[in-house]
Every structure is written in structure tokens, then in C-alpha cells.
């Protein structure tokens, strides 16, 4: 039986194999977060309109679109939510959980733009030092500020 399955798999073309894999494996939504720093070392925090009351503060966050790199997601989301341009840097964290959702976080450096929030998603934006984070900042986002070695970037 194993030989038959192996033979059939070998005969199938790439598109058919891809479709079989897609149908038989979990499909994840990927949430992407950007820890944005300005030249003075301050971090950008946003009060998100659609997040749970009392836990609305966090870093720029959004979902990756099909075919988009995670680095591109950070840059797009920051621009959409704040009007700021950033350059994505080091990967900070990759983790799964929350059902069929994976989370990815990157550092990002401010490179330009003028701060203007998207009022549909964001209530307020602030540049703060890491010791002056607002109450209600997501714990998972606060953890991104803890220095880690490269081997600790995945949870």
C-alpha cells in the first residue's frame, strides 16, 4: 500500500500535489506585529479601536494578505494605521496558538512619514520610552521589549 501511495504521489503533477496538501492541512491566518522605534529609541504604541476594553494598547498589528511577505505586512500595516514609513528589521518572535492563527513579530525602524492615525482602527498613537508604556498594553507586546538571544526568537 505504501508503495502504491508513493508511486501515485510521484506521478501527480505539482499543482495537484499542492492542492492535496492544501486540502489536508490546516490553513492559518497570520497576525503580524511591528515593534517600531524612532531614532531616539522610543517605541510607537497605538490604542486600537477594535480591541478589548482595558487591553487596547499595543504595537501596530494586522493580518498578512495572501502572497504578502511578513516584512511587507509590517510596513503596510504601520503605514495604513499611522501614515508612517518603516523598514522591517530583525524577527523577534514566531508562535502558534489561538486556533488556526500564527503570530509573527518584527522590529521596525522609522524612516519617514507624518503621524496621522486611521480613525476606523486607531483611537490614539504615542511615542513612548520602554519604561513609560501605557496601562493596558498587551502582555504579548510588552514581552517583545525583553532582550532575547537569536535562539530565543521562537516560542
Image (cartoon, rainbow, N blue to C red):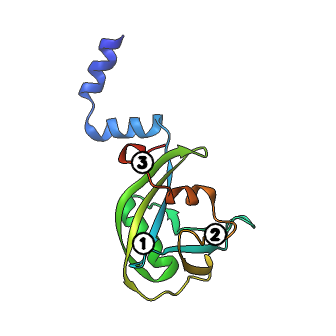
Residue depicted at 72% across the width and 64% down the height: 52
Residue under label 3: 153
Residue under label 1: 76
Establish if 153 lies above or below 126.
Answer: above
- Secondary structure under tag 2 reads strand
Q: Quick one: label 2 or label 1, which is nearer the N terminus?
A: 2
Residue depicted at 36% across the width and 10% down the height: 1
- Secondary structure under tag 3 reads loop
Look at discs 2 and 1 and give the one toward the viewer.
2
Look at discs 3 and 1 and give the one toward the viewer.
3
Contact flag, marks 2 and 1 (Cβ < 8 Å)? no
- Residue 72: x and y in percent read 37, 66
Inter-mark Cα distance, 2 to 3 = 23 Å
- Residue 139: x and y in percent read 62, 57
- Is residue 97 in view from this perspective? yes
Residue depicted at 34% across the width and 18% down the height: 5
Amino acid at each position: 500500500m505504501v508503495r502504491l501511495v508513493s508511486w501515485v504521489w510521484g506521478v501527480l503533477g505539482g499543482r495537484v500535489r499542492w492542492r492535496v496538501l492544501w486540502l489536508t492541512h490546516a490553513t492559518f491566518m497570520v497576525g503580524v506585529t511591528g515593534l517600531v522605534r524612532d531614532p531616539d529609541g522610543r517605541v510607537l504604541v497605538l490604542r486600537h479601536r477594535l480591541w478589548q476594553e482595558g487591553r487596547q494598547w499595543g504595537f501596530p498589528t494586522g493580518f498578512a494578505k495572501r502572497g504578502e511577505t511578513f516584512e511587507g505586512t509590517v510596513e503596510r500595516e504601520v503605514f495604513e494605521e499611522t501614515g508612517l514609513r518603516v523598514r522591517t528589521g530583525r524577527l523577534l518572535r514566531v508562535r502558534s496558538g489561538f486556533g488556526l492563527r500564527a503570530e509573527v513579530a518584527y522590529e521596525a525602524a522609522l524612516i519617514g512619514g507624518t503621524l496621522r492615525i486611521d480613525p476606523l482602527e486607531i483611537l490614539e498613537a504615542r511615542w513612548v520610552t520602554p519604561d513609560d508604556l501605557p496601562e493596558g498594553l498587551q502582555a504579548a507586546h510588552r514581552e517583545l521589549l525583553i532582550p532575547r538571544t537569536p535562539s530565543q526568537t521562537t516560542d
